[in-house]
Amino acid sequence: MGTLDNDLFLRALLRLPTERTPVWIMRQAGRYLREYKATRTRAGDFMSLCKTPELACEVTLQPLDRFNLDAAILFSDILTVPDAMGMELRFTEGEGPLFDKPVRCRADIEALNIPDPEDELGYVMDAVRTIRTALDGRVPLIGFSGSPWTLATYAVEGGSTRDFNRIKSMIFDCPDDAHRLLSLLADVVVDYLNGQVAAGAQALMVFDTWGGVLSPRDYSEFSLSYMNKIVANVTREAEGRRVPIILFTKNGGQWLEAMADSGCDALGIDWTTSLSEARRRVGDRVALQGNMDPAILLSSPDRVRQEVKAVLESYGSGPGHVFNLGHGIHQSADPENVAVLVDAVREFSESAARATSRGLTAPGPLVDAVR
Ligand code: 1CP
């Protein structure tokens, strides 16, 4: 495993100086790219794509070949974990993910399989190894998992949901069952992430897509406490380098201080919290990743450039920012606008870094004051 040609992303996550702001995009491989759709058709269906390491590798590299991105993210899904625990995942056209064996009672929880990352999830570890070899040091590779809470919502609801009634009944009426499930999931996620690091992942991200549907007390008890456990138990160093870990709770803006207390290296921020405010609140404890509204990519190239500038200015000068969207890219986004975004991040952040190093005025949080 050789050296990295571009380690801007890893340095920014550790709040080390960088000559410009690194950028990658959540769900950068996906249906907005025609080459992705072509590979998925060849695979047959989404899970076959995830389960074929050569094809997962191919789609991981597709966005890097089109855009000047500073990180690659393993092509897989958060739902591989409940699938490997025996819930039998299917993706149906139009309906999204479905589990044939959802978890509804204590007996279902006790019957869950505890997967070995190199066995039931070996296809993910093989994908990580294949991608690392293919990247050949171009940019770092991000490994990921869902948070225990977010995985539990899918496991208990049996798929996507709008109201979260079943999982909420479990936390309110049978909190011991919920804690048993969440703690099993946390153990499995730790093994899974450590497996990814052993296979070559150079940074980790935990997606807590649904933590924001909880009350502050329930967020702390049912989501954050299990992410804390993950941060405390994952491998933080490999190949002689720190392996940074990013926590992202969508709609979790009000809990940033508590999330930073987990000991993670960085927080993902969605567009409902300004980066300047987030930075003021977490200080120099963690780096920040985000936070452009993905819907901006549906507007004009000029509007995209304007918003990139506003996001960079909102963060302000100094290290510790990774540019990203505040959530995954929409499938109707125009790839041309992604190119505009990535090039604008490079252009604006390079000139800001040059101005700062010459002692000129650095962009500050002025923009936010007028929002
Ligand atoms: O039809 C298709 O081709 C499938 C669409 C798709 C894709 C491209 C799904 C189904 N998953 C993925 C890949 C994926 N998912 C990645 C890797 C790609 C990349 O980032 O480049 C990652 C990191 C995820 C993570 C994921 N899956 C999350 C967390 C992040 C987020 O967006 O909030 C969640 C919640 C899922 C579940 C999921 N996977 C797919 C669907 C349709 C869903 C359900 C979403 C929902 O409940 O609304």
Image (cartoon, grey):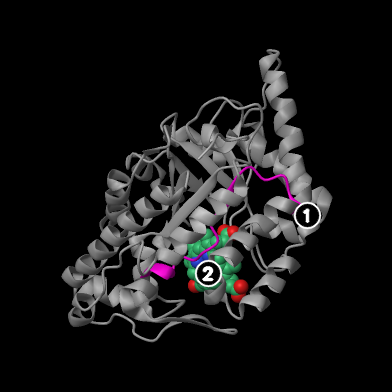
**Distance from Cα at disc 2 to Cα at disc 1:** 27 Å
Q: Secondary structure at mark 2?
A: helix
- Residue 151, given in percent of the width and then of the height, sits at 37, 67
Q: Is residue 76 magenta?
A: yes
- Looking at the image, which is closer to me, 189 or 308? 189
- Looking at the image, which is closer to me, 267 or 183? 183
Please tell me whether residue 122 is drawn above or below residue 349 in the rendered image. Answer: below
Residue in view at x 44 percent, y 48 percent: 204
Q: Say which amino acid is labelled 1.
A: Asn
The residue that label 1 is drawn on is 337
Q: Is residue 26 left or right of residue 308?
A: left
Which quarter is ligand 1 in?
A: bottom right
- Residue 36, given in percent of the width and then of the height, sits at 68, 67
Residue in view at x 28 percent, y 59 percent: 186
Q: Say which amino acid is labelled 2.
A: Cys
Q: Is residue 293 left or right of residue 341?
A: left
The residue that label 2 is drawn on is 50
- Looking at the image, which is closer to me, 239 or 257? 239
Please tell me whether residue 143 is drawn above or below residue 209 in the rendered image. Answer: above
Residue in view at x 71 percent, y 15 percent: 360
Q: Secondary structure at mark 1?
A: helix
The mark nearer the N terminus, 2 or 1, is 2
Magenta range is 66-81
Instruction: Classify mark 2 as within 8 Å of ligand 1 or not, answering yes or no.
Output: yes
Please tell me whether residue 202 is drawn above or below residue 366 in the rendered image. Answer: below
- Quarter in which the C terminus is drawn: top right
